């Protein structure tokens, strides 16, 4: 249905600039069909005078095939959320101006709407739809104020489309029949560790807090969630794509079956005690020649600390107290807390 018709007209295509656009491939209902299509399009022997533009969310059955392909003909791929934030902001602001140009909305408000959208066009689209519906009902000012965060009006209509999007993404990830129950449980833990983190964690940092889970396992579990998460940089820092996702998942009414009790995962993140307790060495971490030197007197202090102290160790030392407070009164934390305060406190002070 694809190759044969193209082969039949390939001579007629010579000398022409033909681009085939396949939009929203992730919305295809047949995962097998998607795999077959991608395998077909990435074949070296498929030598046709055409260009193919394909767009998709980074679903687990799509992203690896596109990302790992290597061949003679270049097939560049672009990840929207890795573009310069300023470029995305300009595009989103242009979209807001075009869609809302018929309404008397100050330029400063348009700019603020673009800032609130971040890197998510779906958020911008939802905001535009929400505001336009308000115009029809004579509620332009009220709805605009709601989107700008100036009022406490119910966000139910504003959030409807965003919630549906997040529900669809999470359902695809967790309802995969090929995923074992144990893997689903692990994926839940990874997702909620990311949500409850006080600052973005690296993949290795997540694994350290979820031992014996390995970095490789964490990477695999994050893969189906790349439509709501973003992994960036050489150290694989994991963040949510937009602030609206934590808002959704932390609200039991909105996220329904995907909601979990946050204190349980703050309790898990008190594994920070284990990270601190197993660090080697437990004294003079940076191997300084003398403890009498002030930090500013150590010439290569930054180099030493980067080598001796992992990102997960830094995280554990900075945020163990916040997770302990948010975990409630978990009885199983009494022993590690007592051990930390009586034995590891000097190590914590040294790193801090």
Image (cartoon, rainbow, N blue to C red):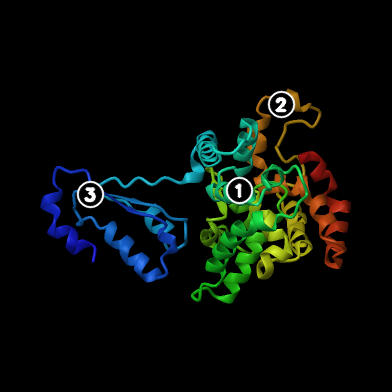
Residue at 47% across, 56% down: 58
Residue 352 spot, x, y in % from top left:
78, 39
**Foreground mark, 3 or 2?**
3
Residue assigned mark 3: 50
Q: CA distance from mark 3 to mark 2?
A: 60 Å
Left or right of residue 27: residue 165 = right
- Secondary structure under the numbered disc 2 in the rendered image: loop
Query: Where residue 146 sits: x, y (%)?
Result: 71, 46
Residue displayed at 55% across by 65% down:
168
Quadrant containing the N terminus is bottom left
The CA distance from mark 2 to mark 1 is: 52 Å
Q: CA distance from mark 1 to mark 3?
A: 37 Å
Q: Which mark is residue 298?
A: 2
- Callout in the foreground (1, 3): 1
Sequence-first tag of 2 and 1? 1
The one nearer the camera, 211 or 20, is 20
Residue 127 - label: 1
Please determine whether, in this image, residue 242 is positioned above or below residue 264: above
In terms of depth relative to the viewer, which is nearer, 32 or 168? 168
Of marks 3 and 2, which one's residue comes earlier in the chain?
Answer: 3
**Given contact means CB atoms under 8 Å apart, are the residues at marks 2 and 1 in contact?**
no
């Amino acid at each position: 249905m694809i190759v044969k018709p193209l082969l039949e007209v390939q001579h007629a295509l010579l000398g022409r600039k033909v681009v085939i656009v396949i939009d929203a491939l992730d919305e295809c209902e047949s995962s097998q069909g998607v795999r077959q299509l991608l395998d077909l399009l990435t074949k070296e022997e498929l030598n046709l005078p055409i260009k193919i533009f394909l767009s998709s969310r980074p679903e687990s059955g799509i992203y690896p095939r596109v990302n790992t392909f290597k061949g003679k003909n270049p097939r560049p791929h672009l990840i929207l959320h890795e573009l310069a934030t300023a470029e995305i902001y300009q595009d989103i602001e242009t979209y807001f101006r075009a869609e809302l140009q018929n309404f008397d909305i100050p330029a400063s408000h348009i700019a603020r709407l673009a800032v609130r959208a971040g890197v998510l066009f779906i958020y911008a689209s939802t905001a535009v739809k929400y505001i336009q519906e308000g115009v029809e009902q004579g509620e332009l000012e009220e709805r605009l104020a709601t989107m700008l965060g100036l009022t406490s009006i119910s966000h139910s209509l504003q959030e409807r489309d965003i919630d549906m999007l997040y529900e669809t993404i999470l359902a695809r990830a967790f309802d995969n029949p090929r995923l074992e129950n144990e893997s689903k449980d692990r994926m839940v833990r990874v997702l909620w560790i990311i949500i409850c983190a006080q600052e973005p964690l690296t993949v290795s940092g997540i694994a350290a807090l979820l031992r014996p889970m390995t970095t490789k396992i964490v990477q695999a579990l994050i893969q189906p969630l790349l439509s709501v998460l973003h992994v960036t940089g050489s150290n694989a820092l994991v963040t949510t794509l937009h602030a609206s996702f934590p808002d959704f998942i932390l609200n039991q009414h909105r996220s329904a079956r995907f909601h979990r009790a946050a204190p349980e995962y703050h309790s898990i993140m008190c594994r920070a005690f284990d990270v601190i307790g197993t660090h080697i060495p437990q004294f003079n971490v940076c191997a300084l020649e003398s403890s009498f030197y002030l930090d500013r007197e150590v010439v290569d202090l930054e180099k030493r600390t980067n080598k001796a102290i992992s990102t997960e160790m830094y995280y554990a030392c900075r945020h163990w107290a916040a997770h302990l407070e948010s975990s409630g009164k978990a009885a199983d934390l009494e022993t590690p807390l007592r051990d930390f305060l009586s034995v590891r406190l000097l190590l914590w002070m040294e790193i801090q």
